[in-house]
Image (cartoon, rainbow, N blue to C red):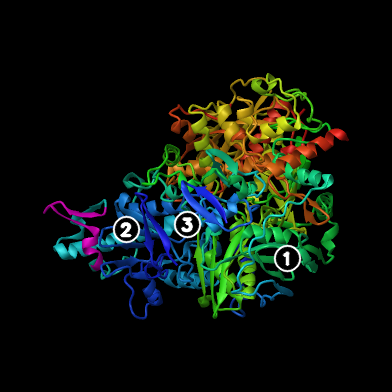
Amino acid sequence: MSRTETDSTGKKGKWTRRAFIGAGVVAGGALVVGVAVRQGNPIDRLGPLLADGKDEQLLNAWVKVDADNIVTAVIPHVEMGQGVYTALAQMLADEMDADWSKVRILEAPADMQYVSDSIGRDFLLPDLEVPALFEPTVAGGILELAQAMGLQFTGGSYSVRATGQRAMRTAGAAAREMLVAAAASEWQVPASEITTADSMFLHAESGKSEPFSKFALAAAEQSLPAKPRLKSPENYRIMGQPKARHDIPEKVDGSAIFGIDAKVPGMKYAAVKAAPVVGATVASMDATTAKTMPGVLQILNMGDFVAVVADGYWQAQQALNSIETTYSKTEGDSLDQDAIFARYARYLDEAGEDDGDMETEQGDAAKGFAEAAIKVEAEYKVPFLAHATMEPMNCTAWVRDGKCDVWSGHQAPVNARQAAADAAGLAFEDVTYHNAYLGGGFGRRSESDNIVMATRIAKATGYPVKMIWSREEDMAQDHYRPSATSRFRGGLDKYGKAVSWSNIHTHLFDPKDAPTVPYYNIASHRIRKVDVPMQLRFGPWRSVDHSQHGFFIESFVDEMAHAAGKDGYEFRRELLAGSERHLKVLDTAAKMSGWGNALPEKHGRGIAFVPSFGSIVAQVAEVDMSGPKPRVKKVYVAADPGFVINPDGFTAQMESAIAYGLTAALYGEITLGDGKVQQSNFHDYPMLRINEMPAVEVALINGDHKHLGGGGEPGLPPIAPAVTNAIFAATGKRIRELPLSRHSFA
Amino acid sequence: MTIVRTLACLYVFMLAACGADPVPGPVEQIIVREPGAAPVAIAAAAVASNPASALIAEGQAAFANCSACHTAQKDGANGAGPNLFGIVGKPAGRVVGFAYSDALKASGISWTAAELDAFITDPSAKIPGTTMVTGAIDDSAKRQAVIAYLESLTAN
Amino acid sequence: MIKLNVNGQAREVDVDPATPILWVVRENLEMTGTKFGCGIAQCGACTVHLDGKPVRSCSTPVSAAAGKAITTIEGITGEDGTLHRVQKAWIKAQVPQCGYCQSGQIMAAVALLEKNPRPSDTQIDAAMAGHVCRCGMYNRIRQAIKAAAGQPATETAA
């Protein structure tokens, strides 16, 4: 199976299987600095995957230098549009002093060894300070756990801030140090006299200069640096630059391969329909017509879904559409939209003042509220949301002779590989997982339900099978962003300063701190949750719990501001007093938007401030309410992710998150009737389109280059509340329930 | 997050594999064509005569292509395009509350089935300056079905 | 057998004439640049040209291509590999994110500029509103179209 490799000039080369770059093992400081493959080395068995010609030498798991002085960065993350390939390569290339025009990028294969240990550490032991003596042990232990949990994945806005910051940069710096040590040894000069730039060594005193490739083999013999020195921002040459993305050229000429584009000789196609109500199974299947339809090969009742395998996808789908299926009865059959929210209300009512699970408590919020001069109460609701990735869910699988190959676009390739192994009844080692570009991830492609289904069909039929979900199936079988209800009580003193904050809400998924507001100086907090059984399958949706709580919190802050007779921006300024970094972001957004300046009649501005995934983002939305529905004209964004590795890429991610979040705020609603999802395609699950996209202006702030924040998700949580706060400013109408299409603005 | 869910397995990791139960095979498997058998030759597409009601039903289903912008029910809202209830036989550019392009307002057309068909096929060729999108329904048979559906709404 | 003209080449396929062009192109002709997004002409990802006009290939049977020239995204790049000015503008503006919708977007933009070399924002809206981009790159799409048309950038829709 060959992979396409792109270099920064946009040319393409073909790789054979022998040439796949493998990975090394993580050691001390959560970073592999694997040198050449040696006997007994854990990466030994990856040897056959590594060598690409006798003059190439693998320096470490993350970078390769070949005889043409081409530096290849091996990226252990997937590209789903967030620009991660390029950003991570920038981080490695800068530390290595590589010539960016000669940097190539490869995605790491889904191998257990190749795990994102940085992520494992952050998830398992956040904020843990480990004495240097114990580093190797801890890292080794984490690696094992990380491997067991299949932690090679992309999500959580982690790629740049964890893998990039901790692994790619260290790998680049380590590679550089080893190369310089080799040059020093060959030239018989002190390493301190050698400088590097653009993949070249220079010894100024003697005038000697050579490309990296000259000493790459010798570098592999050098000992591994214990703690490679990283650059400080004044020396960044590639980080902080808006480098063009490596994957874009193939995305404008139709050559980029997504999961749905997999090609296997002899491949057949499957259309599927799973039971629409969660927990139901197929009771009966009448395929009388389907059996006679052209191109049909097999019809399968798999218990939880029906599949038709045919010579082409369209033929399979037509035949599937003709099958009459009945399903078993379940409790969920009677559930509808009202019943779900009624259930939430009941659970919240039952929790009362004292029950529910305490998330965070500071001071005595109940007392603070009781004694407050001004009291504010509100309840908010948000619906289930679909991911609706542009590329419907799909997977190609082939099971034969005790082996399995799987092709897809997946955010967690090691998980996908394990899921296929389980579904095929094979060992992990018997499965080869081939990843491709993702036509949208947003969290949906971190699930493996499609992998399992395709593998089961492949196993049953013996064919290589490409399973494609129709848009209707994709809409019906999502792992939705959960709906939620949240109730607030806020107390203000006679000066209109917030003094108490009480909140109880349904569910908590991830991140656990999403409902908390530690950055706002409020004397007493009391935040609780209740777990309510949810009818639908749920999963991570871009910005996860920040998508609901960003709306809840920033709406309620605005209501408190209004009750205090204060402007939303000034009120938040007070609450952020003393936090310079937070204030700078808020002030920048307000200033950019001309906050306080006059607007045309029936126009309003709303502000929202949400720190998430390590980044701080404030947005101001300008909304025109003069028509029958809200028109968002412009969004101003101030964002501080610590340090922006690629300004164009980060800006694009802000635009992207705003569009995704605004679509949800305006239209997004997955409703249930008779236990089934009622939406089926883009005509009843409407999308924001070019004619409704607001102008977006982004200001980037490098607030702390040592602590990076994420880019993929933080732009989303503020948009809904910025818009609803703007609607309030323009009309006096307070929106407490999304989407906006539920409300009349006539 | 995948991580959060598998964290629940973390504590049993040392005791047992976190894997799934063996995944079941098919409950029923109908093999219509054996592997290796040649496909049946494609038969000429049968042109079924559509009873009127089937055509209207097909048109209603095909109207999904239009519903991003248009509603068809009586007193339905205007969206990016005007409400189309009763449109067949009416003069163009007259639905109350919709901001038509000048071109369409001035067209002088009455929406017979033939005019609708030509318009949907290539809006800006029919009425240069219109904001109606191209490519909404490219299949001639589907267009007829949608027009039949719209005609049926007038009759009600 | 059905005779087709695809990207200037004569091709023959053995398919049911009711098969949508999308699946003939992707499966029989093995050209996967044209994408499947919704199947009901709501998202634009499947857009190809029939005699230069954009059509939703998911909803157009291959029989409708009789006697017409089909152009797919693969046919937009010149035979010698030269990119169309729209593709160049797309790269310069760094338009694609995930990229899945972009074949369709580019097909629509190319057809728009063929017909209307200096489109207004309203005309851009009309030509492009049928295309969904889940990654939300609408403003970049607009700027790239303007750039390809040699026009100055504007902020947003009229």
Q: Is residue A695 above or below residue A468?
A: above
- Rendered residue at 55%/30% (across/down): C156
Dot 2, how many residues are within 10 Å of its Cα: few (below 14), some (14-19), or many (20+)? many
Q: Residue A373 versus residue A332: which sits nearer the camera? A: A332
State yes or no: residue A210 in magenta: yes
Q: Tell me the element at label 1.
A: helix
Apparent side of residue B88 relative to residue A649 in the rendered image (left or right): right
Q: Position of residue A349 (x, y in %)?
A: 83, 51
| Label located before the other in sequence (3 or 2) | 2
Badges 2 and 1, same chain: yes
| Residue hosting label 2 | A71
Q: Tell me the element at label 2.
A: strand
- Rendered residue at 57%/52% (across/down): A440
- Identified by mark 2, the residue type is Val
Q: Is residue A252 visible?
A: no
| Residue hosting label 1 | A292
Apparent side of residue A655 relative to residue A192 in the rendered image (left or right): right
Q: Residue A368 versus residue B155: which sits nearer the camera? A: B155
Dot 3, how many residues are within 10 Å of its Cα: few (below 14), some (14-19), or many (20+)? many
Apparent side of residue A372 relative to residue C152 in the rendered image (left or right): right
Separation of marks 3 and 2 at Cα, in angstroms? 22 Å
Separation of marks 1 and 3 at Cα, in angstroms? 55 Å
- Identified by mark 1, the residue type is Thr
